[in-house]
Image (cartoon, coloured by chain):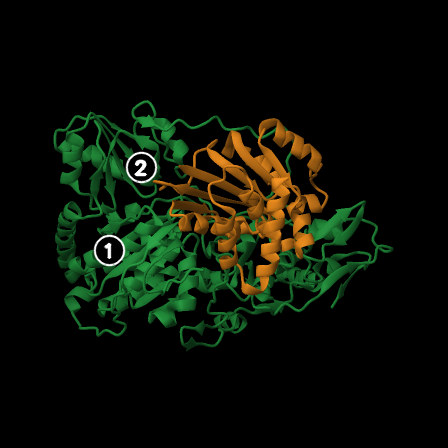
Amino acid sequence: MVNLLSEGGKQLLLGNEAITRGLIEAGVGFASTYPGTPSSEIGNILEKISSDAGIYFEFSTNEKVAVEVSAAAASSGVRSFVFMKHVGLNVAADPMMTLAYAGVRGGMLIMSADDPSAHSSQNEQDNRYYSVLALMPMIEPSTPAEGRSMVAEAYRVSEELEMPLLFRTTTRMNHARGIVEFGPISERKTVGHFDRDVKRFVNIPAYARLNRKVILEKYAKAAELSEESPLNFVEGEGDVGVIASGVSYAYVKEFVSGVSILKLGFTNPLPEKKIADFVRTKKAVIVAEELEPFVEDQVLRICAQNGISVPVYGKRTGHMPRAWEYSPDTLKGIAGIVKVKDFPQPMSVPKMDLPSRPPTLCAGCPHRGMFAAAKRAAGKEDVIYCSDIGCYTLGVQPPFQAADFIICMGGGAGAAGGFDRSTDQRAVAFMGDSTFFHAGVPPLINALFNSHRIVMVILDNRTTAMTGHQPNPGTGREFGGVSTKPIDIESMVKGIGVEFVRTVNPYDVKAATQTFRDALAFEGVAVIISKCPCPLELKKRKQLAPAVCAVDQSKCNGCGTCLKTIACPALFKKGGKITPDPVQCIGCGMCASVCPRGAIEVRK
Amino acid sequence: MKYTVQIVGVGGQGVLLASMVLGNAAMQMGYDVAMSEVHGMAQRGGSVLSTVRFGEGVTSPLEAAGSADMILGFEPVETCRSLPLGNRDTVVLMNLDPVLPSMVAAGFEEYPPVGSVVSAVRSEAPNLRTIDATDIAIKAGKAVAANAVMIGAMSAVEGFPIPKDVLLRVLMEQVPEKFRDLNSKAFEMGYQAASQ
């Protein structure tokens, strides 16, 4: 079993566990996040162990706030760590950009967990460019072991420069596992003091102009640190050089032979002299990095400025792809230039029809009831379903098809207002409770302010489900020695001034359908709150009351209405009859609520 | 020596536990270990793949297509889908108990007869071994121990680099105390079934 607080030894750790161990060793006193895959495990671990580790930790309402609270801690001399998924940094970009001007006093790392191949994301943006945009130095680990060891080095650099650093990871680092040797645990400072320095921390135009010069000086100093950094090193020998960073390094190291590798862990600013010296002695150079040609373009520029005419192969030459994450197979693209391990001929998938297995909403998921109710109430009306980021994204699948437009957290409600104003269609927005607190309040206010006629559905399942059941303002918190009361969504919505506010039980699909009808008929902003805890969360807490649905086979005529409207994975169709699977069924009764023959009953 | 096991199945079948047992056992043997797991979306009833690599100088958490030494298939259709992870020399150890996808359960798609999945897999993979892991687990006490059956069966494969006793010991370390008897029994039955 993993124990991140142990004194020493080695353990097989997930990248995110290794980073957390790094925080413990580096004396971090303050941490904040908004959950997002592939960064979420760090928060789940800190929720459990932050008290024992002596670290203050919070789930902030969104990434922007998470950066702000950590910025204050670091400005007061407490080492802080703020972490999020890549798209979360878009939300946090505003404070980050100016925080870079002010800098920090205690070390601060901003972790961006990027997701090449968009395993659980809506895009595969390359956040390394944020480090250039913000003039913020960047560190990139390649393996779980480096996830631990680079944290301490990153804090050292952050404090030497008095700047926050970007700590950039990717899914195959966060969710890789490897052997991690533990180091000693440093002393932890958890209480600091904020010493006023208006010229530094108040970036009014007059001071911002001065701080622009300061940050450029710090950036120049960072370039010197990058040149000397132990995180940038050369290994192996060969006429051909490979410049590699992130997980690409692991693929090159293991599967390419006879090359010299310049391994980059301090990737902004790049060690320009080290790169020039490396490239100059080579017959050819390959740049191996996922996503955009971030390093490659700078290598080309460094070559141009230094009069080096060594061919540089990578994305610009078409040898390496720009889309999707890399794997050992990606190296086949450079097999004509270097020696890549011969991989055996793969077997084929036999030619037979295999059923699909997409991720689906769980058995008894309350979202099912709300999608079913919305579709029934809308009937033939042309409704645009604006959805959001969370489990309910899965409503895009049949039979619900209740997602026509998804862009970002809170984006569905904003878009619904725009559709209302610019089309003659009706707009319904679905969003979760955590998303409502994260980014759902401003678009709701916007709809009222600008008189948009929308139906906003808040799917309050009493947790942040998709990322692994983190608490949110609607649940209150009960960890790390801090206890707070839940914030009531209905009172909030009423407080804003919404006149149509109804709270429904999503398991009663009939009643929910009627509420939807009323909401669709309402001339203004209508808010429906579906309040029902996530059954997975209840199962985890051992609070799920035992119940199952039973079908009276003498009444069931196999019409399939339950399957077509609720599509619960606990419902099986065998020999024209419906049979609930007692292992999966939680007895929520949604199927009973839609059965036209009253053939299904809930047995407690 | 380097060895790669690709473990495939469906969320909830214990793929991650099996990969943790294998990875920790490899670490105890003194090997370098690199693994990769799929989290997030894939856990909502979707397919799950876990890559476990161990040996001297292993760094990469992923393996190239065709390069698996073993495919540990917890579910027939998922095993079938994952064959390109291995080559004709790869040992494919496949549980015969299907987990029906929701669209199949609802009657909108069909699950092929397991016998035809076995023949199709065998036509590609000459080193196929099948095992009734779920049935064996039920006989051992509970269906959830199917992953322990699979781990036991894996340890019976000729030439597998990690000895049976190491795998069993690590399995006992990874499961809660009250489930140790069940898992130990299931492991042993899996070993016996695969040794025949």
Mark 1: few, some, or many residues within 10 Å (few <14, many ≥20)?
Answer: many
Q: Measuring 54% from the left and 55% from the top, which residue is drawn there?
A: A391
Looking at the rendered structure, the kind of residue marked 2 is Lys
Q: Answer with mark 2 or mark 1, whichever residue precedes in sequence.
A: 1
The hue used for chain B is orange
Nearest the eye: A594 or A60 = A60
Residue at image coords 38%, 45%: B31
Q: Secondary structure at mark 2?
A: helix
* Residue name at image x 17 percent, y 34 percent: A278
Q: Horizontal and vertical percent for residue B117?
A: 66, 34
What residue sits right under mark 1 in the picture?
Answer: A154
Rendering coords of residue A226 (x, y %): 17, 47
Q: Please identify the quadrant where the N terminus of chain B is shown.
A: top left
Give the left or right position of residue A244, taking residue B107 as reference.
Answer: left
Residue A539 placed where, x, y %? Answer: 60, 64
Task: For residue A593, say whether it is visible.
Answer: yes
Three-letter amino acid code of the residue under disc 1:
Ala
> What chain is the green one?
A
